[in-house]
Amino acid sequence: MLTNALLALLAAEPPPNAVLAEMALLHEALVVTLVGVETANVDAVPAAFHKVHAAKEETARALDSGAWKPKAGTTVADFKKQDEAFHRELEKLVKAAAKKDVPATAKQLGAVITGCPACHAKFRPEPAKAP
Ligand code: HEC
């Protein structure tokens, strides 16, 4: 079950920052994909990821302006590199879903999910102290 803190973060209006806004959409798209795999109908997957892609532009602006910074000791350039590699995996997922290929979508979902902790461990800023 999702913790209340995570639910609140995902539902925050407006989202606290551009990266978290993108993450909330990413979370949603992943759930849409999982449900698609479960029901053997992945038609809704491409549209869910197009929203993520649109949010990525806002993230790029926040990175370029310095409004959002990755974890201390890492660089924006390295973060962007990892983000771009991740988005290439998302594109493969969208392509599989666009072909209505449920097994290929499920397989690529695995590759995409592997990318979440890979980036979080390296670039997620230390959380603010709990209130
Ligand atoms: C390229 C880097 C990157 C990738 C890949 C990535 N994330 Fe994130 N994610 C972040 C960063 C950075 C934060 C923290 C942002 C902040 O707190 O300002 C974050 C935060 C989150 C949060 C908010 C919860 C929390 O504890 O901070 C969720 C939910 C989330 N990501 C979901 C996902 C999911 C699901 C995936 C994989 C499908 C994913 N992310 C992949 C960088 C990434």
Image: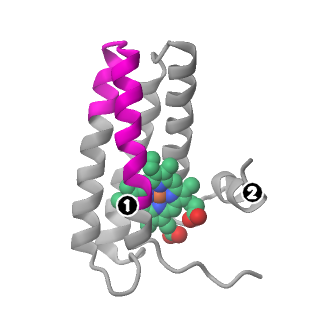
Q: Which residue is mark 1?
A: 118
Q: Residue visible at 41% across and 75% down?
A: 67
Q: Which residue is mark 2?
A: 3
Foreground residue among 6 and 49: 6
Amino acid identity at mark 1: Ala
Q: Residue visible at 33% across and 87% down?
A: 73
The answer to whether residue 91 is left or right of residue 40 is left
Figure check: 61 above or below 123: above
Location of the C terminus (image quadrant): bottom right
Amino acid identity at mark 2: Thr
Residue 105 appears in the picture as rendered: yes
111 falls in the magenta region: yes
Residue 34: mark: none
Figure check: 76 above or below 7: below
Magenta residues, start to end = 92-117
Q: Residue visible at 66% across and 59% down?
A: 9
Figure check: 3 above or below 124: above
Measuring from the top left, give residue 68's x and y in whole percent: 42, 74
Determine whether the beta carbon of the residue marked 1 sits less than 8 angstroms from the nearest atom of ligand 1: yes
Q: Residue visible at 39% across and 49% down?
A: 114
Q: Main secondary structure of the magenta part?
A: helix
